[in-house]
Amino acid sequence: MAITATAMTMTVSTGLQFAGSLNHKQTSFLGVPLRLSMSNPQPSLPSVFLNVQAKARTRTEDREARHSRIRKKIEGTPDRPRLCVFRSNKHLYVQVIDDSKMHTLASASTMQKPICEEFNYTSGPTIEVAKKVGEFIAKSCLEIGITKVAFDRGGYPYHGRVQALADSAREHGLQF
């Protein structure tokens, strides 16, 4: 690579002569001759190739990261236990947990007989099934004297089945 200069402009060339440029051995800049040593005409490549890649994270890993951020802020106490939601492709699970004692106070899921027998679904729980699970967990919480809970959406968006479950639990007497 050589630097060539004309009267008004300075250009960089790779040994090719362009119209209006001078030979690289005759060039000077402000009266000082410019010489570039070209012992190796090809640029040298680094001896160690760096392989930089972004970490590929799955949807489950992203959800678990969101859930851990939520859990830093929400804690179940005896006065206000945590209503935790887990959603799978086939089922929906809800637990009311006292984190100070590490006890599950109440639970409901689509695998329980009263909910499973009422709905005949094959492709997974729908919004209607989520409403029924919310109603069931609210009734079981009110039976043992729990009226206030902290809602833990489990890293899932507050939309669809999770929202339907929360709204149904609110309608049937839980406060959160």
Image (cartoon, grey):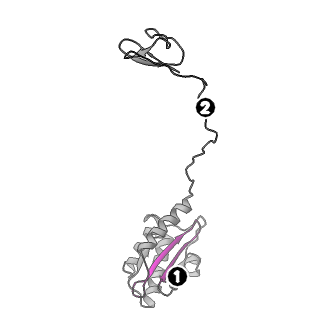
Q: What's the residue type where badge 2 is placed?
A: Ser
Q: In the figure, 154 relative to 17: above or below?
A: below
- Residue 161 at x, y percent in the picture: 47, 67
Query: Which residue in the protein does label 1 denote?
Result: 107
- Considering depth in this image, is 155 or 75 the residue closer to the camera? 75
Which one is in front, 131 or 4?
A: 4
**Residue 162, percent from left and from top:** 46, 68
Q: Residue at left 52%, top 66%? A: 64
How many other residues sit within 10 Å of disc 2, few (<14), some (14-19) or many (≥20)? few
- Quadrant assignment for the C terminus: bottom left
Residue 83 lies in magenta, yes or no?
Answer: yes
Q: Is residue 166 above or below residue 81?
A: above
Disc 1, SS: strand
The range drawn in magenta is 75-99
Residue 165 visible in the picture: no
Count the numbered circles shown: 2
Residue 129 in the image, given as x and y percentages of width and height:
51, 71
Q: Check disc 2 and report its element: helix, strand or loop.
A: loop
Residue at the far front: name it. Answer: 32
Pointer 2 residue: 44
Cα distance between the residues tagged 1 and 2? 66 Å
Indicate yes or no whether the magenta region holds residue 129: no
* Residue at position x 58%, y 65% in the image: 89
The one nearer the camera, 162 or 42, is 42
Above or below — where is 126 with respect to 46?
below
